[in-house]
């Protein structure tokens, strides 16, 4: 295997890490947003809930931006194709994502009940919808997506967005992702919140965690029985051109192939289940910090499971399976990946250190802001 | 050859991109400038220890926060819109264009967004000096963001650092130094960043002028006015200098943009006396200006910094494009043959010989029978050449007037800042209410200049997304009109309600001024909480 | 010990500035201009504020009132 192939795998792993970071950190904020109306009955309680993620949501959201940038640079063709095929769904995701920063900044700046009530609904939508779409997109990708390429690299889509929305398996994946976000958000509310938010969050997070267990198991059974894709010929060192150069077969149960070949990989889905179940137990034992980390493990396991099942596929084409996007044919050039690696190696430790410092500076429990104060979120 | 995308969809995609980018760019310049102005105010606070500068930092910081949220929100759209609407573009240049965007996230946006939380909420949690460092990091982060975005944009304007690879059918990253030190990117970054400084200065100056006129919060307003005018006058000089540099750069890099910007139809060989058009009514159908007022002896030295360099006119540039189109058609036909059979070394050789013109082959595709360049023969070639060559020129009317509105606003602001700074330095500002009123009512000018600057830069790049390499009409995603209508209507509704909420809050808090902001702090003042940051106050207590 | 850390910190900033100056000075004259220009703008604006305080004090002095 050449350097290029190693770089391709490295960036596939890194993309996975970014998606996990996105799911854990942004998912947590979205969970808080989705739960806010339920854990907070009064305006003061809702503000307490908001201020728990107040100083960090913006930093966390960068995971989303960074995820977009990394897909664009490291997997240009995947970026070009996936966001276009899922157009309507992606636009809905964008709409809800762009409402969120505005809601944070503007909600508490006007005291009128109607104003705040409106933004509280925005928090619910912009918390729940993106997580459902995030999961549903992954569900659709597992099932294969209707697109193919012309000789010049122009892509063509052949499936209507209804197919992507009204799809039982995709909805199941969307709900799994929402449950995990509610779990993670609830845990965060417990970590920095006080009663009554604490107790309500504990109950919602436990339900979220248990729902995730059930949905994940059902999803697993469905994936095992689903028609997956198998790469019959393809070369890890091939130039990154999805138009030609590989052959692909549709096989029932193909997504289980990697587990059959390497049984040790079963550890990944088990990790997801363990994280969810132990997490709920930790919350019941009033150990939210432990619960938070177990929730992170659950996300890592869940996204890891998708990655391991599909490898080396990234977005299979149901239209023309030979043009499926894989780790080998959808990446950036070797030169580009080298530069991206250099930047990632330099900046990741820097980012981790200053992000930790900021969390350290802003640590501690959050109290309910006083009613007349309009300067916190 | 290839199925073409519905031209209406391309137009709607362009409209959507322009609307979302112009909207995003309402908030970006203020962020670029305000962060450094806040850092300046806080620096004075740390040096002199005077509380008023802390109050200033917090008050202007609050207004900045209202703006910042929308900048972040609308920036999300930009990061993903290349993928959702410009699929072929993203595939074709993502390997080189995506990289600066990714680095922007890694190096700049992460820094800005993480520290902005501490900047707003961390006043009582870290020392004054540490907080000052945080404010500077936010300022640096937001401007580094602009740097990487404009490096990406520089590649669209003057593609350097990338090479086309016939095996992957895309442009690939090949030279990092060429990419980041692209002179267009360099000058565009400084121009844009300083334009942001001007925007921030104008904002602070105008709101301060309002307080001075209404005789409220004068302590805060007079100090803010001083800082803003000095900041503004030097930044304005910088913006003008860099604007001039960009013109000079574009004479070499984008002659079609320059010719359209100045509405030069015919090459004037008499370079010394060539007139610079102050006013012109360009007519594209007639290939001339229906009416023009020119100032002789200005054009050549202004644009080329010489007296002798010839600036090609639009009519000549159209003729110059024709041989490139012929060569481009050969390149693309050979490229298709090579793609069907990678053993076809002859096709590869033909492609290589004509590679630098392949974009012109793409451009001719829309006029080829069945959009297939192979169908072009000696009979239909002349008419295809005529139509394609005309397409290489951007919309002259838009380019000429967008450029002039930007320049006029810029020079007016420079003059205003100069007077305001002069009287502020003499501490006589309040004796000149007319100037104060002008400062207040000029508030929209930096936004007008920025928006028209964007239009000048991006309309002038047409018909290309990547200059001379990839035409805009090929770059778009193949959506239906229904899809585009859905997203356009959604963006319009969302963005309109956002701007309504933003303006409402901005006016509300600007009118309230800093007193209201410190209303409840006064109660705590006795308890050693004076100057407690309003942002951090309510929410946290340390365990 | 604190002085030592301060020294190290300032040294790091100096080395970084020199490095940036050399790189941008060679390859990116406009980037270099931005670094110098922005520093200058911030310093001049801050100096303007300090001067304002001086002017205020003088005016207060003339009026004979004690600040």
Image: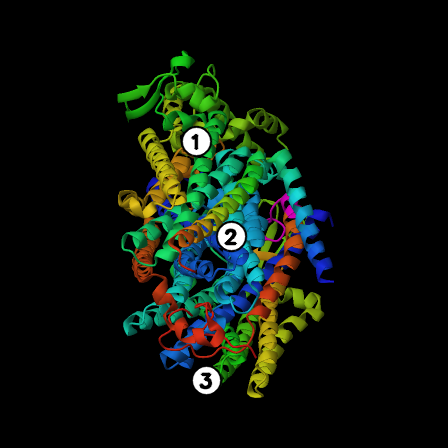
Q: Which mark is residue A200?
A: 3
In this rendered view, identify the residue nearer to me: B272 or C13.
C13
Q: Does the magenta stretch include residue A338?
A: yes
Asked if residue A323 is among those painted magenta in the image, a careful observer would answer no
Q: Tell me the residue that label 1 is attached to.
A: B363
Q: Locate residue A205 relative to residue A266 in the image: left or right.
A: left
Contact between marks 3 and 1 (CB within 8 A): the answer is no
Instruction: For marks 2 and 3, give the CA distance.
Output: 40 Å
Q: Position of residue C16 (x, y in %)?
A: 66, 47
Percent of width and height locating residue B199: 40, 46
Please give the chain letter of the residue carrying mark 1. B
> In the image, which disc is placed on residue B139?
2
Q: Is residue B323 above or below residue A348?
A: above
Residue B259, compared with residue C42, is above or below; it is: above
Give the magenta range.
A325-339
Q: Quadrant of the C terminus of chain B?
A: bottom right
């Amino acid at each position: 295997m050449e350097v290029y192939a190693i770089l391709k795998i490295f960036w596939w792993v890194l993309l996975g890490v970014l998606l996990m970071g996105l799911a854990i950190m942004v998912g947590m904020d979205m969970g808080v947003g989705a739960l806010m109306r339920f854990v907070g009955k009064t305006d003061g309680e809702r503000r307490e809930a908001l201020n728990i993620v107040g100083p960090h949501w913006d930093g966390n959201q960068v995971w989303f931006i960074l995820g977009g940038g990394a897909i664009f640079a490291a997997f240009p063709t995947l970026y070009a194709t996936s966001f276009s095929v899922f157009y309507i769904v992606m636009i809905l995701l964008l709409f809800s994502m762009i409402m969120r920063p505005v809601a944070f900044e503007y909600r508490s700046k006007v005291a009128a009940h109607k104003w705040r009530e409106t933004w509280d609904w925005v928090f619910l939508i912009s918390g729940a919808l993106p997580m459902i779409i995030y999961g549903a997109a992954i569900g659709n990708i597992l099932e294969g997506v209707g697109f193919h390429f012309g000789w010049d690299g122009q892509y063509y889509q052949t499936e209507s967005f209804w197919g992507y929305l009204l799809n039982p398996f995709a909805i199941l994946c969307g709900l799994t992702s929402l449950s995990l976000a509610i779990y993670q958000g609830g845990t965060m509310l417990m970590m920095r919140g006080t009663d009554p938010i604490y107790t309500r969050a504990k109950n919602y997070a436990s339900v979220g965690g248990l729902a995730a267990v059930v949905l994940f198991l059902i999803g697993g059974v469905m994936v095992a029985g689903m028609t997956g894709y198998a790469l019959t010929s393809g070369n890890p060192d091939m130039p990154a051109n999805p138009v030609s150069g590989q052959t692909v077969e549709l096989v029932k149960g193909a997504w289980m192939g990697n587990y059959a070949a390497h049984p040790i990989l079963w550890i990944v889905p088990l990790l997801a289940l363990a994280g969810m179940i132990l997490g709920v137990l930790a919350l019941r034992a009033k150990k939210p910090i432990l619960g938070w980390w177990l929730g992170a493990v659950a996300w890592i396991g869940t996204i890891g499971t998708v990655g391991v099942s599909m490898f080396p596929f990234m977005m299979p084409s149901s239209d023309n399976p030979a043009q499926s996007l894989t780790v080998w044919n959808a990446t950036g050039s070797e030169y580009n990946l080298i530069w991206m690696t250099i930047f990632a190696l330099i900046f990741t430790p820097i980012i981790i250190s200053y992000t930790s410092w900021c969390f350290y500076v802003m640590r501690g429990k959050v109290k309910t802001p006083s009613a007349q104060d309009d300067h916190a979120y | 050859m290839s199925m073409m995308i519905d031209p209406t969809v391309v137009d709607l995609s362009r409209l959507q991109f322009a609307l979302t980018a112009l909207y995003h760019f309402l908030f970006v310049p203020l962020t670029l400038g305000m962060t450094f102005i806040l850092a300046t105010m806080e620096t004075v606070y740390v040096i002199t220890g005077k509380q008023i500068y802390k109050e200033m930092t917090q008050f202007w910081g609050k207004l900045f926060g209202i703006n910042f949220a929308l900048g972040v929100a609308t920036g999300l759209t930009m990061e993903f819109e290349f993928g959702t609407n410009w699929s072929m573009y993203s595939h074709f240049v993502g390997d080189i264009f995506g990289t600066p965007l990714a680095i922007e996230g890694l190096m700049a946006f992460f820094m800005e967004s993480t520290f902005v939380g501490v900047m707003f909420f961390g006043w009582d949690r870290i020392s004054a000096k540490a907080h000052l460092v945080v404010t500077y990091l936010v300022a640096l982060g937001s401007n580094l963001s602009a740097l990487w975005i404009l490096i990406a944009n520089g590649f669209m304007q003057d593609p350097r650092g990338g090479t086309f690879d016939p095996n992957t059918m895309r442009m690939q990253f090949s030279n990092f130094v060429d990419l980041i030190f692209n002179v267009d990117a360099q000058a565009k970054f400084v121009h844009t960043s300083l334009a942001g400084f001007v925007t921030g200065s104008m904002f602070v100056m105008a709101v301060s002028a309002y307080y001075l006129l209404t005789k409220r919060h004068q302590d805060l307003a007079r100090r803010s006015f001083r800082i803003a005018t000095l900041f503004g006058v030097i930044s304005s000089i910088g913006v003008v200098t860099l604007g001039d540099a960009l013109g000079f750069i574009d004479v070499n890099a984008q002659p079609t943009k320059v010719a359209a910007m100045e509405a030069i139809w015919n090459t004037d060989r008499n370079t010394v006396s060539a007139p610079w058009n102050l006013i012109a009514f360009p007519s594209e159908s007639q290939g001339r200006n229906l009416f023009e007022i020119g100032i002789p002896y200005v054009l050549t030295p202004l644009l080329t910094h010489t007296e002798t360099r010839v600036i090609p006119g639009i009519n000549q540039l159209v003729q110059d494009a024709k041989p490139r189109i012929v060569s481009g058609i050969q390149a693309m036909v050979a490229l298709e043959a090579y793609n069907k059979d990678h053993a076809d070394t002859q096709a590869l050789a033909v492609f290589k010989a004509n590679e630098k013109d392949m974009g012109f082959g793409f451009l001719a595709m829309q006029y080829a029978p069945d959009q297939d360049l192979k169908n072009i023969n000696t009979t239909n070639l002349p008419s295809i050449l005529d139509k394609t060559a005309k397409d290489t020129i951007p919309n002259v009317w838009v380019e000429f007037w967008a450029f002039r509105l930007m320049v006029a606003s810029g020079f007016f602001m420079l003059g205003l800042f100069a007077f305001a700074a002069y009287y502020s330095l003499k501490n006589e500002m309040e004796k000149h209410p007319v100037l104060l009123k002008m400062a207040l009512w000029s508030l929209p000018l930096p936004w007008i200049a920025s928006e028209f600057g964007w239009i000048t830069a991006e309309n002038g790049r047409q018909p290309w997304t990547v200059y001379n390499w990839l035409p805009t009409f090929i770059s778009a995603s193949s959506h239906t009109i229904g899809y585009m209508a859905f997203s356009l209507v959604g963006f319009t509704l969302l963005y309109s309600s956002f701007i309504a909420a933003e303006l409402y809050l901005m006016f509300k808090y600007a009118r309230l001024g800093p007193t209201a902001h410190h209303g409840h702090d006064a109660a705590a003042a006795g308890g050693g909480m004076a100057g407690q940051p309003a942002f951090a106050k309510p929410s946290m207590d340390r365990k | 010990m604190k002085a030592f850390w301060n020294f190290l910190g300032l040294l790091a900033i100096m080395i970084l500035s020199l490095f940036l100056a050399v790189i941008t000075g060679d390859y990116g004259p406009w980037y270099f201009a931005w670094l110098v220009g922005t520093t200058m703008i911030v310093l001049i604006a801050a100096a303007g504020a300090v001067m304002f305080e001086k002017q205020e004090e003088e005016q207060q002095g003339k009026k004979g009132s004690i600040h």
